[in-house]
Image: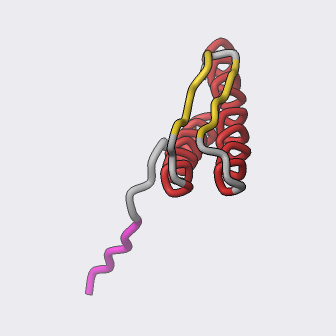
Amino acid sequence: MTRAKKIAVLNELQRLRVEVAGLRRRRSEVLSGAASASISSGAGSKSYSNWTPAQFDAEIARLLGEIAVLERSLAGRPALVIGHATIRRA
């Protein structure tokens, strides 16, 4: 991975982590009774009107999946491991 690519991946990781932290805070606010939430970041502003906690959970899980893929690429591993099998001959 080139230096420029690594820097781009690190910047994207930071952005995603900030977004996950914001979603977790907003989820907590919704659980406390707020009807809507919004997040402002360097990438713009997003509004989450009438989201259920489950919808926040799903979006957080999706973003954590993206983070995992990027972290694996930084470590030089494949982006996704589908499964592992051992085959032995008799």
Residue located at (53% from left, 46% from top): 65
Q: Could you tell whether 83 is left or right of 52 in the image?
A: left
Task: Please report the bounds of the magenta region as a residue range.
Answer: 84-90
Please state, as top left, top right, bottom left or bottom right, where the N terminus lies in the image: top right
Outermost residue, left side: 90
Residue in front for this viewpoint, 20 or 4: 20
Q: Find residue 34 and report its horizontal and vertical position in percent.
A: 66, 46
Q: Is residue 38 magenta?
A: no
Instruction: State whether residue 77 appears in this view.
Output: no
Residue located at (72% from left, 33% from top): 18
Outermost residue, bottom side: 90
Please state, as top left, top right, bottom left or bottom right, where the C terminus lies in the image: bottom left
Q: Is residue 89 magenta?
A: yes
Secondary structure, magenta segment, majority class: loop
Residue located at (66% from left, 56% from top): 31
Residue located at (60% from left, 44% from top): 35
Q: Could you tell whether 68 is left or right of 88 in the image?
A: right
Instruction: Tell me where residue 22 sits by quadrant.
Output: top right
Q: Could you tell whether 20 is left or right of 53 in the image?
A: right
Instruction: State whether residue 68 appears in this view.
Output: yes
Q: Find residue 5 and report its horizontal and vertical position in percent.
A: 61, 17
